[in-house]
Image (cartoon, rainbow, N blue to C red):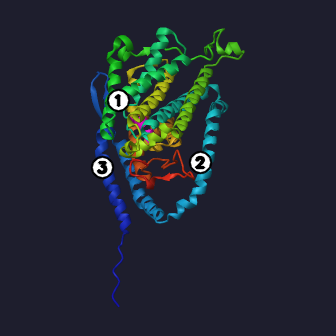
Amino acid sequence: MADSPPKPLVNTSLLGALRAAALTGLLTFALLIPLVGFKTVQNIRNELVLETRWSLLFVIVAVIAGLRFFHELVIVPWLTRRAERPSVEAALSPWRARLSRWATPFALGFVVVYPLLALLINGPQGATKWIDNFGIQILIYVMLGWGLNIVVGLAGLLDLGYVAFYAVGAYSYALFAKTFGLSFWILVPIAGSLAAFWGILLGFPVLRLRGDYLAIVTLAFGEIIRLVLINWVSLTNGYAGISGIPRPTFFGLPFNDSDGGFAATFGIPFSPIQRTIFLYYVILALALLTAAVTIRLRRLPVGRAWEALREDEIACRSLGINTTVTKLTAFAIGAMFGGIAGSFFAARQGFISPESFTFMESAVIVAMVVLGGMGSQFGVAIAAILMIGGTEIMREFDALKAVFGPDFDPTQYRMLLFGFAMVVIMVWKPRGLIATRVPSVALKERKAISSSLVREGHG
């Protein structure tokens, strides 16, 4: 009887996980040395001094290497076993169906009562931060994500200059409100219409472009709009921005402590949180309007044309669909919702400047659509909550300052976390958090389309 080969002293999977973690740690260290390891600050003589932050760098490298080790040792075998058991997904489908049935009503109920919960838990003083910095800020980006989802998720047109329409809406509201004294409710549709007009202007030059080329042109368009805002000083006031923008009123009643204000008219004590709650419900109504219009359009012929364009433009042309009109409507409607969100942003802030409309804003909105799942409104909303709400939550983590020093500001590493989240999502769920689509039209029975049944990049 032949002797059996000796067993290895160390598991090969453990060695592979250690090797992958070490390689990931080295790459992370090399990439983050100029971003995290060094920092330039000004001393008392107004000179730039180079400081080192080795402790912070080594902690980040250790965390990333540890996560890679855990992924290789635990997650990869689990995914392999899961792929070999297709019945698991089928067993979970009833649970997923029940979850999807109750998720939307629960989410709607929660966002409606959210200001009341914040008031009940934190009181009028503490609730302002939670309603404004979390509720209103997240809803603005949810609306922007849903607007871009029409262009990217439904029509399949990669737009990296979406912030341009956001800026057009904001500056349209600010200029018309200060020059002509028009009310918020009149200027919101005007700002949306002007943004839609610019969306059509962008759509015409890019009718023959797709993929990377389309992304480059739309990115250039966003930068052109920002440079116009900076250099057209006589109209936009350049870098100084526009201040003193009129705030929205409740049927002509301003939210101040005057005799003709909202509080005095209804006989209640004045509080600054009244305006915050009013703005919350305004942006909530605008976001729900965006969702309702998008859902309705998906069931119409134009929505089905968007989906056909997304899947295959050549097949779309062969079916007799006018791809020119299809692309222009996607750009126009998506831009319109971006302009409406921009008008609300200007009314809420009371001040706007070109610094609020940089490429980084477009990158954040595109990341929401990609992370949430292109074409999925619920997924985009979840991604907006995680990305925007997560950034705000990081400001509250004083424990991080105890670890990394009193000058540590976690919000400075927002884009680093975004990039890490993108990598995790692309490995875990390559087509976003919500990786299934429900067809707008079904022949006999409506079924969700699994991401494994569609081509890469279109799931």
Residue 76 visible: yes
* Magenta residue check for 368: yes
- Rendered image: mark on residue 27: 3
Q: Earlier in the sequence, mark 2 or mark 3?
A: 3
For marks 1 and 3 on the same chain, the one whose residue lies earlier in the sequence? 3
Q: Nearer the viewer, mark 1 or mark 3?
A: 1
From the image, give the main secondary structure of the stretch colored magenta. helix
At label 3, counting other C-alpha atoms closer than 10 Å, the crowd grade (few under 14, some 14-19, many 20 or more) is few
Single out the mark in the foreground, 2 or 1.
1
Tell me where residue 30 appears, x and y as whole percent.
Answer: 28, 46
Residue that label 1 marks? 204
Type of amino acid under label 3: Leu
Disc ID at residue 100: 2
Q: Is residue 214 left or right of residue 302?
A: left
Position of residue 7 measured from the top left corner of the image (x, y, whole percent): 36, 76
Q: Are marks 2 and 1 in contact (CB under 8 Å)?
A: no
Residue at (38%, 65%) from the top-left corner?
13
Query: What's under tag 1, amino acid-wise?
Result: Phe
Amino acid at the residue labelled 2:
Ser
Q: Which residues are magenta?
A: 363-369
Q: Quadrant of residue 217?
A: top left
